[in-house]
């Protein structure tokens, strides 16, 4: 350091330097805490929005219980709803299905329900999940319309969740 710099520094009281350092550290800590809080708030908002869309999807899936295709028995349709419900619940996290994609799928599902769902609606739903998140294809073994599941489908193996269960679940979800 030059002699003039040393002279200038010598004229600044030590407690002033400490005060500037302390204030600088306080500002840095406040900025870090604010950044962390903003990060947490952003994630909470993201999960809340995704949760709202996921809830809407659950309502749409259970609403299928009131729109059984004429060619299917109650138990066969309940089997389809159960399998579709399990797929959606298993992949409802935003790291699997982005919120925007889930919102698009639920809007299309609601339109298909209005038009009269059938087994093609179930296949469409599964295909959409496969397209948006290809790892869901590992669940093909539980897709209700596969040849491998034909006997379970025909028997209406709904696993203890009859159509009346899905109708009550719909009513409970809507009332929330």
Image (tube, grey):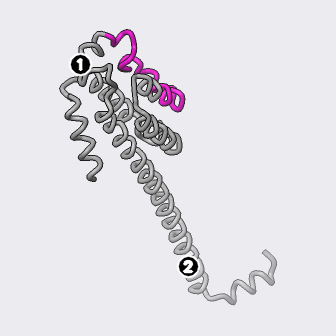
For this orientation, the residue located farthest to the left is 160
Q: Find numbered disc 1 in the image and state the secondary structure of the residue it sits on.
A: loop
Question: Foreground: 41 or 45?
Answer: 45
Q: Residue at x 36, y 29 (%)?
A: 84
* 92 relative to 42 in the view: left or right: left
x then y, percent, for residue 108: 49, 38
Residue 133 inside the magenta-drawn segment: yes
Mark 2: give few (<14), some (14-19) or many (20+) Cα within 10 Å: few
Number of the label disc, if any, that sits on residue 35: none
Judge depth for marks 2 and 1 and give the one in front: 1
Please provide the residue range marked out in magenta: 126-150
**Residue tagged 1:** 157
Number of the label disc, if any, that sits on residue 23: 2
Q: Main secondary structure of the magenta part?
A: helix
Distance between the alpha carbons at the discs numbered 2 and 1: 69 Å
Which one is earlier in the sequence, the residue at label 2 or at label 1? Answer: 2
Mark 1: give few (<14), some (14-19) or many (20+) Cα within 10 Å: some
- Give the quarter of the figure containing the N terminus: bottom right
Q: Find numbered disc 2 in the image and state the secondary structure of the residue it sits on.
A: helix
* 3 relative to 99 in the view: left or right: right
93 versus 134 height, above or below = below
Question: Foreground: 13 or 94?
Answer: 94
Classify residue 168 by image quadrant. top left
Classify residue 45 by image quadrant. bottom left
Q: Residue at x 33, y 34 (%)?
A: 64
x then y, percent, for residue 6: 74, 81
Residue 113 inside the magenta-drawn segment: no
x then y, percent, for residue 97: 48, 38
x then y, percent, for residue 126: 44, 26
């Amino acid at each position: 350091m030059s002699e003039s710099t040393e002279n200038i520094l010598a004229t600044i009281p030590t407690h002033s330097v400490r005060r500037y350092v302390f204030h600088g550290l306080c500002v840095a800590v406040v900025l870090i805490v604010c950044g962390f809080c903003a990060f947490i708030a952003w994630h909470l908002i993201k999960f809340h929005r995704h949760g709202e869309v996921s809830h809407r999807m659950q309502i749409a899936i259970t609403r299928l219980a009131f729109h059984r295709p004429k060619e299917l028995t109650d138990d066969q349709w309940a089997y389809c709803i159960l399998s579709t419900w399990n797929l959606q619940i298993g992949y409802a996290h935003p790291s699997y299905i982005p919120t925007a994609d889930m919102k698009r799928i639920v809007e299309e599902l609601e339109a298909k329900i209005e038009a009269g769902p059938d087994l093609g609606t179930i296949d469409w739903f599964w295909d959409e999940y496969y397209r948006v998140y290809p790892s869901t294809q590992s669940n093909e073994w539980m897709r209700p319309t596969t040849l491998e599941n034909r006997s379970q489908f025909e028997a209406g193996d709904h696993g203890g969740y009859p159509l009346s269960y899905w109708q009550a679940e719909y009513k409970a979800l809507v009332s929330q």
